[in-house]
Structures are given as C-alpha cells and as structure tokens.
Image (cartoon, rainbow, N blue to C red):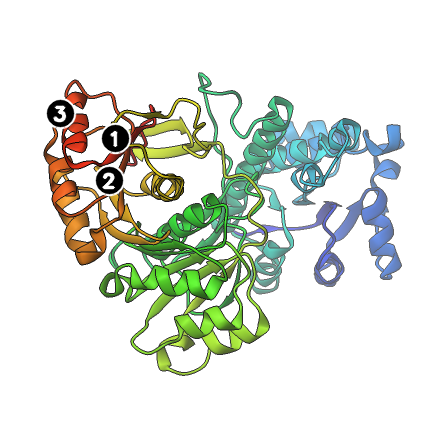
C-alpha cells in the first residue's frame, strides 16, 4: 500500500511539548490544521493558521469543554474508508472532509490522582471522553488515518511526510497499536481509582495490571536473557522503581532483585541499620548507631560473601559510612539509601577503580509502606498474595522452656526474628550483639541450614541467639545449636515433635520462644 497523503490534521492535546514545531512542519507540507479550544489558541499564538473545530462542525464547545469533538463531522472524517465509494459519497452529502492525521493525548488523569488530597471532582474532570474516542476511531481506521498520541512520535511522522509525502502502513499500524495500549491503560487507571485499590478488589475474579516500562535492563538473570523494569501506576514512596540513580553503570535484573531485598530489610529494622545482600539473601546485617558502626558490623558478619554484595541502609549515608564501604579489600556493586550526603558521594565515586561503576540509588524517606500485594509468575499465570510486611504482635509469644530469656536476649531475639523472615526458606539465622553472624538459607532440610549457619558463625556462636522461619520438625537442630553454645532460640512452634526441641533446650539451659507465626520466603 502506498503512503497515505496527509491533507488535514485534527489537533487536540493537553501535553503541548513540541506541538508548535510539529504543526509548523505540517503546515510546511501543506497540511490544513484544525484544532479545538486551548490547542488552537496555543498554535495561533505561535503565528500558525488554524481552523476552529466548532466553526467546522457548526456546533459550539459546551459544558466547560466536556463537549467539543464528539460530532459526526469530526468522526466521519476520521472513520471514512477512502477506497469505499459509498463512504466518500456520504461524506460529500454531509459536507464532511477527511482527517488523515489525528493528534491527541489524553487528560492527565494519573498525574492528577497522584497529587496529595485530590478531590473526587478534580479526578473526575480529568477523565477524558473525546480523546479516547478520537484515538479509537483513528486507530481502527489506520489504513487511511495516521495518529500521534505523544510528542515522542512527532519526529517519525515528519520524517515520513518529508520523505514520502505521507505515512506508511507500517508506521500507522504501529501508532495504532500504541494508541490502543494507551486507551487500555487509561481505562484501567480509572477503574482502579474508583475501586480505590491497586487491583480491583482483594483476590478479585479478574485483575488487570497496568504497567509502564521504566527502562530496558542490560540483561536478565543471565546475559542471554532479555529484561526490562516496569512500574505500577501506584508505585509511590520508597522503592527501586521510583528511585533516583545518582551514580554508576546500568542496573541489571539481579541488581534490582538484590537492591529490593536490601531495601526491604533496611525498612523493616526500626533503629539505625545496615544490611549486605548476596544472591537475594542477607549475608550481613547489624543494628547499632551510628551508621558507620552498623555498616562495619554488617560487613564483618560474613566478609567473604560481602565482597561484591549489595548494601542497604535505613539512614542517610554519610561520609564516615562511605569510608567504611570504601575500605581496603571491599567491593560493593550497589547501595540503596534514603539519601546520600555530598561527601559520601565523593568518597564512593572516586578511586579505586570499582567505584567508577558503583550504583548509588536514593529512595527518599523509608516511612512509606511497602506494596500490600505481591504477584509472582508461574507458567501459565500468576500467584497473588498479601505481602508479609507487617510486624508480628508479641502478645502470642510464649516462653516454652524452663530457662527464661534475659531482657538482653529478648532484644537480640527480636533482631534475629526481624531478619529471618527475609531469608529464603529453610531459613536459620544466628545473631550476636545485634549483628548477623551466621545464615543458613534455601536448604532442603532445616538441619542443613542450621549446620551452615553455625559453620559461618564459627566461634561467634557462643552466647548467640538463633531464629528459625518455621518450626523444627525434630530436635536435631536444637542439639547442634546447643553444642555450638547458642543461648536462646526463637521459632514459630507447631511441630508434632515440639516436645523434643523443648526438652533439648531444657537439658542445656537454653531459652526458647514460640511466636506462633511462620515466615516462609520461597
């Protein structure tokens, strides 16, 4: 099919970026311009000749602009099939002229509802009616009509207009596809607003995700896999999607997964804290003020694993903390923090060589809640669950051993319990002086995880505490912990053999707390 010549363009936009230059290029190609309301005034101020849509239709704009392009003389000119004599005859009989180009972008509904304390009336007035109708009409009739939905598309249209005197079917079909995507996303945002939820309702019969691509990533989990980062419209607050990258090379799929894990733990800990992530599990974490002390302890938790790790902190990262991270024998891939001091950025982005590439991600204050829902793909579909992102009440906690934990041990158990929920199950963590000293993650048996955590901790097990994300099915892990000098244990309880674990603790004078809540992380 030969390029379609553009004789007339209909312009009605809220985003006026680049519009004047685009309209000038159209006028230079002898395209007649029609526009409505504010678009017409904007173009006329730039000295362009523009015909008012209401003058063409003979019907005035009404109701504060709610009614302006919804007219047969507009939509007939967009929907007419140029190769159908009956369509063209009907056009002539009704005094309708064809519009071969439609330039429309929609009212900024999503931007409006993102504002603090937006009213219902303000939101509803930003629901576009004429715009989506124009887009659907031009997209449906893309064999004969070209459409532009954003300023980023103008240059491609101008290039073809100058090269061919019109647009190709390939371009028109691509623009039509993008228009239908925009309308679908727009309608989903409106539906979500009226439901007041990111999904229509909890565990709804049907769920539509409205995702915006933020960036194409270097690659996926491996270099042969493609990957991209997408944002939900509601992705506000402290998260990796809306973070500001202050420095460093492009992020990879794995970087983002690890940064998200680091941010989740840092957000969870109530006092000054630092965490080191490796392969989506914490290999170091500490709560101790000031931040540089916590950071040093977190790195010392498992120095070999921390090399090439991902760091997260829950306080602004200062120069002293940056100096710890930039110390000898350190190598950090990426850091996420609420803010970075200027002096810290200077330290982290100068020699040695690895610092030229370190990614610095600033997310803002961590008081914003995490997303309430989690989606996870499986082949053929998705799983949906509420996020495990709320603190456990301590009222159900029970001390089940003869030995009672001291106040200091209880504080240490709280820290270990806060960390273990972020470790892949079967999860065992050991902590001492609010410092993660041993982690066993992702093993097929809990006793294997216990052995790994004890081996990682070495002599630091003496006087440490142990947390388990789920119950101990047998007493074997407790016996290993006792032999290593563990002083207290926290676990959900609920095994048929809980008595074995309790007896093993009582035999060695170990305190044990049952929380009554499991925290598997698959």
Q: Which mark is residue 178?
A: none
Question: Is residue 476 placed above or below 229 in the rendered structure?
Answer: above
Q: Which mark is residue 500?
A: 3
At numbered mark 1, what does the secondary structure look like: helix, strand or loop? loop
Q: Is residue 228 left or right of residue 497?
A: right
Disc on the earlier residue, 1 or 3: 1
Q: Tell which tag, 2 or 3, sits nearer the viewer.
A: 3
Q: Mark 2 = which residue?
A: 427
Mark 2 burial class by Cα count in 10 Å: few <14, some 14-19, many 20+: many
In which quadrant of the rendered image does the C terminus lie? top left
Proximity of marks 1 and 3: CB atoms separated by less than 8 Å: no
Q: Mark 1 = which residue?
A: 470
Along the line of sight, which residue is nearer the eye, 46 or 90? 46
Residue 509: image quadrant is top left
Residue at point 46%, 58% (across, down)? 336
At numbered mark 3, what does the secondary structure look like: helix, strand or loop? helix
Proximity of marks 1 and 2: CB atoms separated by less than 8 Å: yes
Q: How far is mark 1 from mark 2, CA to CA?
A: 8 Å
Mark 1 burial class by Cα count in 10 Å: few <14, some 14-19, many 20+: many
Question: Is residue 265 placed above or below 127 in the rendered structure?
Answer: below
């Amino acid at each position: 099919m030969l390029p379609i010549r553009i004789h007339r363009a209909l312009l009605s936009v809220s985003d006026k970026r680049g519009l004047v230059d685009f309209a000038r290029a159209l006028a230079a190609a002898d395209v007649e311009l029609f526009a409505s309301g504010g678009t017409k005034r904007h173009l006329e101020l730039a000295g362009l000749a523009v015909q008012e849509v209401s003058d063409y239709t003979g019907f005035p704009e009404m109701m504060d602009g709610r009614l302006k392009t919804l007219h047969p003389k507009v939509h007939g000119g967009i929907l007419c099939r140029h190769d159908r004599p009956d369509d063209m005859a009907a056009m002539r009989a009704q005094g309708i002229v064809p519009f071969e180009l439609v330039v429309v972008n929609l009212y900024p509904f999503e931007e409006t509802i993102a504002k603090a304390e937006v009213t219902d009336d303000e939101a509803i007035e930003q629901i576009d009616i004429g715009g989506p109708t124009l887009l659907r009409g031009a997209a449906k009739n893309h064999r004969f009509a070209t459409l532009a939905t954003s300023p980023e598309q103008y240059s491609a249209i101008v290039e073809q207009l100058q090269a061919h005197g019109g647009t190709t079917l390939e371009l028109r079909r691509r623009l039509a596809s993008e228009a239908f995507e925009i309308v679908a996303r727009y309608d989903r945002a409106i539906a979500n607003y009226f439901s007041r939820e990111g999904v229509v309702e909890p565990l709804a019969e049907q769920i539509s995700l409205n995702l915006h691509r933020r960036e194409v990533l270097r690659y996926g989990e491996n270099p042969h896999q493609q990957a991209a980062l997408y944002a939900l419209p509601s992705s506000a607050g402290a998260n990796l999607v809306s973070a500001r990258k202050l420095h460093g090379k492009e992020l990879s799929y794995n970087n983002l997964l690890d940064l998200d894990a680091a941010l989740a733990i840092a957000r969870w800990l109530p006092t000054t804290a630092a965490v080191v992530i490796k392969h989506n599990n914490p290999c170091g974490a500490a709560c101790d003020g000031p931040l540089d002390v916590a950071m040093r302890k977190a790195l010392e938790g498992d120095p070999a694993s921390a090399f090439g790790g991902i760091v997260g902190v829950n306080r602004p990262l200062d120069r002293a903390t940056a100096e710890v991270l930039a110390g000898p024998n350190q190598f950090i891939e990426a850091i996420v923090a609420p803010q970075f001091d200027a002096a810290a950025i200077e330290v982290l982005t100068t020699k040695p060589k690895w610092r030229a590439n370190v990614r610095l991600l600033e997310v803002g204050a961590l008081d914003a809640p995490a997303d309430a829902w989690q989606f996870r793909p499986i082949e053929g579909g998705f799983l949906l669950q509420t996020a495990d992102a709320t603190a456990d009440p301590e009222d159900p906690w029970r001390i089940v051993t003869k030995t009672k934990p001291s106040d200091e041990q209880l504080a240490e158990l709280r820290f270990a319990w806060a960390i273990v929920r972020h470790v892949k199950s079967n999860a065992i963590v050991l902590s001492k002086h609010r410092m993660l000293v041993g982690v066993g993650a992702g093993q097929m048996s809990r006793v294997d995880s216990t052995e790994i955590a004890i081996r990682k901790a070495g002599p630091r097990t003496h006087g440490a505490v142990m947390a388990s994300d789920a119950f101990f099915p047998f007493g074997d892990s407790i016996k290993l912990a006792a032999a290593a000098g563990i002083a207290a244990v926290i676990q959900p309880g609920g095994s048929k053999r809980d008595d074995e674990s309790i007896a093993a603790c009582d035999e060695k004078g170990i305190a044990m707390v049952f929380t009554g809540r499991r925290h598997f992380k698959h």
